[in-house]
Image: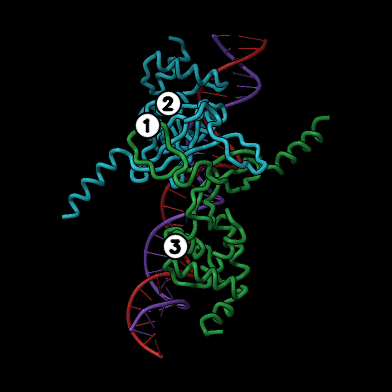
Chain colours: A green, B cyan, C purple, D red
Amino acid sequence: MTATEASYDDAGLRLAAADASLLADSIRSAGLKVTAPRLAVLRALTDLPHSNADALFGAVRSDLPGTSLQAVYGVLASFGTAGLVRKIEPAGSPALFERRVGDNHHHIVCTRCSVVHDVDCAVGHAPCLTPVDALGFDVRAAEVIYWGLCAQCQLDIGSQAETAAP
Amino acid sequence: MTATEASYDDAGLRLAAADASLLADSIRSAGLKVTAPRLAVLRALTDLPHSNADALFGAVRSDLPGTSLQAVYGVLASFGTAGLVRKIEPAGSPALFERRVGDNHHHIVCTRCSVVHDVDCAVGHAPCLTPVDALGFDVRAAEVIYWGLCAQCQLDIGSQAETAAP
DNA sequence: CCAGTTGTTTTGAACGAATCAAAACAATGT
DNA sequence: ACATTGTTTTGATTCGTTCAAAACAACTGG
């Protein structure tokens, strides 16, 4: 183990060596310096896709207690511009982040519990949709958000109705 | 002119009588009380679709100087639940409001100047899109936002390049 | 046409999410 | 190892929005 690798462990990270080096590689090859907070955020994002900054902060903190929320915001911003993560902003919720980038997939959000799932693009890849009349716009991206009830919430509402009705 | 109508004029509204009563009618038939701030907000929204609360506040203020920003938020919230206005929340911008409701149209946003235009739904009406795999969700709505450069910004960027390049 | 009820607006404060700035610090290239 | 460059911490601040209570105004029924 090199001195550099040791410093990540010293900082409190408990990553399998293979995991850590894969994460480090993707950070490095995005042209960014590899740091403990960046590894921790990227790992948290792997485990918890569609998380907001605060949730990631919580996850990162348990690995790396000294980390600040602002650091998480900074890491996410640099990851965003480097193309390592994608930021989505569904109406009424804070920004969410995911590692799945490069494809033009969409999202489905539960109106009751706010859970988010990925939805693959129906037609080819980016951009999968073309407006009928673009009004002179040069359209670069189409973003689709489906809203509905997730399977679990459909069940929850059903059993709630049973309890309330008779 | 009845005493009730006079009070709207007294409050500073300068609406053509026909306009005012049309607006009042739609507020009333949505089951809401007709008030001066509500008329002013609804009129501002007619003139300035895709406006945020602050822009509407500015417009309302010139008609009705005593109005508070919180009143505008309150009016917009009640209009929203009454189905009189639709709220859209494009990533990175405050909430925008429009009177066009009931159809499932979408929006195209300029990434440079943030101007918003309506885009009609490609296939029938609500919901115009069905995800390939809804993952057990009961899908109720599909919201599409197109991102691109508006015609004016394409021109602006072109002339800017000419100036900068040689 | 007036009074009571109900709902709306004002006033003032507070909140969550995100950003800014400067100083302390750490990762890479030589 | 050192210098450079970029990152993180610390602390404050912004913006958009919501909350709460008291003052007030629109509709309804007498």
Task: Find disc 3 in the rendering and name its residue.
Answer: A78
Amino acid type at circle 2 is Ala
Quick one: quadrant of the N terminus of chain A?
A: bottom right
CA distance for labels 3 and 1: 38 Å
Identify the chain of the residue marked 1, using the numbered disc in the image.
B
Give residue B141's quadrant in the image. top right
Which-is-in-front pick, marks 3 and 1? 3
Mark 3 surroundings within 10 Å by alpha-carbon count, few (fewer than 14), some (14 through 19), many (20 or more): some
Amino acid type at circle 3 is Ser
> x, y (%) of residue B156?
25, 44
At horizontal 54% and vertical 70% (from top left) the residue drawn is A22
Q: Which of pointers 1 and 2 lies earlier in the amino acid sequence?
A: 2
Mark 1 surroundings within 10 Å by alpha-carbon count, few (fewer than 14), some (14 through 19), many (20 or more): some
Name the residue nearer the viewer: B151 or B93.
B151
Label ID, residue A162:
none
Amino acid type at circle 1 is Ala
Identify the chain of the residue marked 3, using the numbered disc in the image.
A
Image height of A131 relative to B125, above or below = below
Whether labels 1 and 2 belong to a single chain: the reply is: yes
Name the residue nearer the viewer: B60 or A149.
A149
At horizontal 54% and vertical 18% (from top left) the residue drawn is B29
> x, y (%) of residue A133?
38, 31
Task: Look at the image and tell me whether residue B84 can be seen.
Answer: no
Image height of B132 relative to A48, above or below = above
Image height of A16 relative to B159, above or below = below
Q: In the structure shown, which secondary structural element does the residue marked by tag 1 occupy?
A: helix
CA distance for labels 2 and 3: 44 Å
Task: Find disc 2 in the rendering and name its residue.
Answer: B40
Task: Look at the image and tell me whether residue A88 can be seen.
Answer: yes
Asked if marks 1 and 2 touch (Cβ < 8 Å), the reply is yes
Task: Find disc 1 in the rendering and name its residue.
Answer: B59
At horizontal 41% and vertical 35% (from top left) the residue drawn is B51
